[in-house]
Image: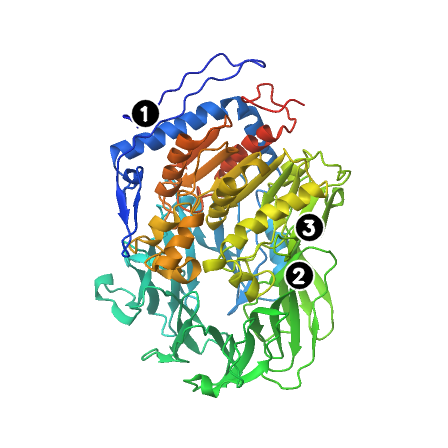
Amino acid sequence: MKPTLLLATLMTLTSTATAQTLLTPPDAERRPHVVKAPHGAERNDEYYWLRDDARKAPDMLAYLNAENAYADAVMAPLKPLEDALYEEIVGRIKQDDSSVPYRERGWWYYSRFQTGQDYPIYARRRDGDGVDAVSIQAANDAGNFEGEQVLLDVNTMAADKDYFSVGDWEVSQDNRLLAWAEDDVGRRQYVIRIKNLETGEVHTDRIEGVSANLVWADDNRTLFYVENDPETLLTVRVKKHVLGTPASDDALVYEERDDSFYMGIGRTRDDRYICIGVESTVSSEMRCAPAAGPGEFTVLAPRQRDVEYDADHHGGRWVIRTNAPGADGVAAKNFKIVTAPSDATSRAQWQDWVAHDPNVFIDGFELFDGFTAVAERSGGLERLRLLRGAPGTADASHDYVKVDEPAYSIGLSTNAEPDTDWLRYSYTSMTTPATTYELNIATGERRQLKQQPVIGYDPSKYETERLWATARDGTKIPVSLVYRKGYQKDGTAALLQYAYGSYGNSIDPTFNLPAVSLLDRGVVYAIAHIRGGQEMGRAWYDAGKLLNKKNTFTDFIDVTRFLVEQGVAAPDRVAAYGGSAGGLLMGAIANMAPDDYRVILSQVPFVDVVTTMLDASIPLTTNEYDEWGNPEDRQYYDYMLSYSPYDNLTAQAYPATFVGTGLWDSQVQYWEPAKYVAKLRDVNTGTEPVVFRTNMDAGHGGKSGRFRRYREMAEMYAFALDRLGVADATSTPAPGAKAD
């Protein structure tokens, strides 16, 4: 047993092209602590002491700072490479860029960045003759901001702050007031502020401890918002605030007492209703009230386990996406679309419109006066179906928005107003930067409104393809690849393989600006669309959660082995990358198949599954019993324990590992990766480095600002490239770098 905490035992020798750096990593003290389950099971967690909800314990902070100092020392020889990567990445960014403007209630809204600035400016221009999305973009590109009204200059708001984020903002229906939610800690506990856009005055109103979700009522004085529980951060209450009154007087509108549900609020497409939506992993419920006089909120259809729905209102009816069973009692697992009258209060009033298809997953929809756009997934890829006619029309004809590449991502963009024939949608692929199009449904004309400018990037130099790997149980797993042209599948290349694989969150093959620096160095970048996501429909998600969770991990490993067998990469030059629940994936594959990976990159990883899921006070725990299982049930406890990365660390040689976290992370608490790294150091019999970087002023998404996160990414990429033996302009390789 190790008796002391070595705060920093770091000794550095001369740094030359041939000398190596002698480093001794921090050694965290072991302190016995028993974690008990209600059914009597016990586990000894010797690093439990690293948890401090207040983030103030001196011994804990000393350990994190020692790990950061050790990370500095290990990464010091790679600083030239890190700097080169950072300069390349930010050098591709058009610094004075702006978003595509959209029109709403007589104003065109957009955001823009200024050269050298980290944060956006949110602004608008009044509609008028000759004013449209194209003309505004041209004016912005020319630096002509005459006639612009600045809503929020986040650079000014973030001055002298280590972290700052504007989570959401809403303009009142009369266009006079702006409400926004801001966070200067990174824990996603927001503060709502209100500004008069005519005078520029910021009102004294201040609402603390809320989510980023807010909605104005039609009276332009009443603001609805969602209050968080201060400990668990669960969205628990909807309240209404009247402008100019103390937040302490805000009336309670609705309280959710089931702690397995999330909550949000919004307006319907036609602006007639304000709706409160609650949803768990397997159930949902909506209650709505007229926006013109929101009094009592009426339930659209009572919640029922294993029935999910989300509704919008337009054209005098509700249009609802749901997996509810039909008359035959069979659930629409991939969802269908139904309609209902405006006064509907039960599922008995729902009428099928777009039928369920076991091969097509319905992801969402957007309602217009003369057509409906439906976002779908089929064959592992997204598509947009266009239904002509009013919502609910029985004989509506349809077609699909055309695409040109084998692996891509397509989705609905901002369509703020329904009375138009133009559909805005986004398109991207692993070689095509994000592009916004407008398609005229009546004429078929397509206009490109904007493509993400990427300085120095030539898409013709890169190639993307879609492969199918066979998992050990025979399931075909889609894999998206991108590489620089000229690359040969001769079994010698380096590979970075990324995946997520949880919550039904699909990882689509989109353009990755930082990854270009990898491609230009000969690295192949792959996305494994493993089970636990929803790329192949709801069954794909179900096959990667609860008691099927291990499919997520074995799918990833089987994709790696397939790519090596196909000559995509050398067997000793594979890096794996994942974050959050994808960090759970990284921890699992490191335990299960350490010899398949040269490098593991794990950001904000969920690695202590059992202890976290036993603690209902931790944010998100109770909401996720239907994702991971409730360990108070012995069956789920034993299954989770069998794959939890922290609990399955064992005496073996682990790959080189880079772990990152944020001290103020509200989703995966910092102590999970801290404990994991401390224990990994105990059992690791190998010599590959383990680097643990804690951002002391950031949360789940890393540092705020558009450039700061790329510094963190450059450090992680430098670590990976070094361990993969990728040649670069650094004269001082880190210890153990592969010779070229």
Task: Look at the picture and state if 442 lies above or below 205.
Answer: below
What amino acid type is highlighted by mark number 2?
Tyr
Marks 1 and 2, how far apart at CA: 55 Å
120 or 736, nearer to the observer: 736
Secondary structure type for disc 2: strand
**Which badge, 3 or 1, comes first in the chain's sequence?**
1
Question: Is residue 608 visible to the viewer in this orientation of the structure?
Answer: yes
Q: Position of residue 144 (x, y in %)?
A: 58, 50
Task: Look at the picture and state if 428 lies above or below 694.
Answer: below
Marks 3 and 1, how far apart at CA: 47 Å
Within 10 Å of disc 3 (Cα), the crowding (few <14, some 14-19, many 20+) is many
- Name the residue carrying label 2: 437
Marks 3 and 2, how far apart at CA: 13 Å
Q: Position of residue 291 (x, y in %)?
A: 39, 77
From the viewer's perspective, is the residue at label 3 or at label 1 nearer? 1
- Name the residue carrying label 3: 432
Within 10 Å of disc 1 (Cα), the crowding (few <14, some 14-19, many 20+) is many
Within 10 Å of disc 2 (Cα), the crowding (few <14, some 14-19, many 20+) is some
42 or 646, nearer to the observer: 42
Secondary structure type for disc 1: loop
Residue at x 68% of width, y 35% of height = 570
Q: Quadrant of the C terminus?
A: top right
From the viewer's perspective, is the residue at label 1 or at label 2 nearer? 1
**Which badge, 1 or 2, comes first in the chain's sequence?**
1
What amino acid type is highlighted by mark number 1?
Leu
Q: Position of residue 508 (x, y in %)?
A: 60, 55
Question: Is residue 131 visible to the viewer in this orientation of the structure?
Answer: no
What amino acid type is highlighted by mark number 3?
Thr
**Which badge, 3 or 2, comes first in the chain's sequence?**
3
Label 3 close to label 2 by CB (< 8 Å): no
Residue 7, numbered label: 1
